[in-house]
Image: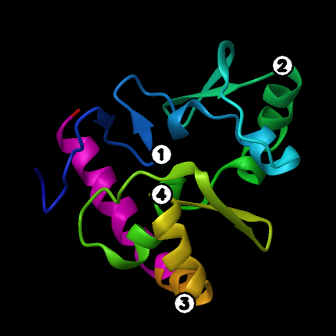
Amino acid sequence: MHKGLKIYNKRKAGLISQDIDGIAVKGYDMVALKVNVKLEKGTVEHSLMLNEVTWLFSSKENMVLFVKDPQKYMPEFGGYCAWSVANDSELPPSPGDPSAYDIVDGKMYFKFNKMVRFLWRISRAKYIKKGNDRWPQFVNAITEYLKTNA
């Protein structure tokens, strides 16, 4: 542990929420989720490494779209739980679940689960602002941790 940085079992520390094998956002296809509003698991056949994590896609077409503009399809706060980023003191924040997402002003926000999503929706503007204000702290702490534990 480093300055409150908690490493979850079966999770790897990083700026992107990932499992122990370095698979981003539980292996879901971010293009399918954002464009088709469809929760689809990606495959190893359609995968790429970006930002030191592996992103999986359900099709070559979706992988190509992601490569053209990754920021368009990446979830906010690295795929961590948006409510956790706004409220928790643990680092890294709780992992987000792509099945508990919202798209607000074109940005995708994951929550830990659907109950947390319900709570987040009650004051989403407040939580988005708090999350945006606090996210740089998480980035700095996680970056420092990764440098000292490489």
Q: Secondary structure at mark 4?
A: loop
> Mark 1 highlights which residue?
16
Tell me the amino acid under the disc marked 1: Ile
Specify whether 53 is left or right of 73.
left
Proximity of marks 3 and 1: CB atoms separated by less than 8 Å: no
Q: Which mark is residue 113?
A: 4
Where residue 146 sits: x, y (%)?
A: 27, 43
> Mark 2 highlights which residue?
60
Query: Which corner quadrant of the image does residue 86 belong to?
Result: bottom left
Q: Secondary structure at mark 3?
A: helix
Proximity of marks 3 and 4: CB atoms separated by less than 8 Å: no
Q: Which mark is residue 88?
A: none
Where residue 114 sits: x, y (%)?
A: 53, 61
Q: Earlier in the sequence, mark 4 or mark 2?
A: 2
Q: Earlier in the sequence, mark 3 or mark 4?
A: 4
Tell me the amino acid under the disc marked 4: Asn
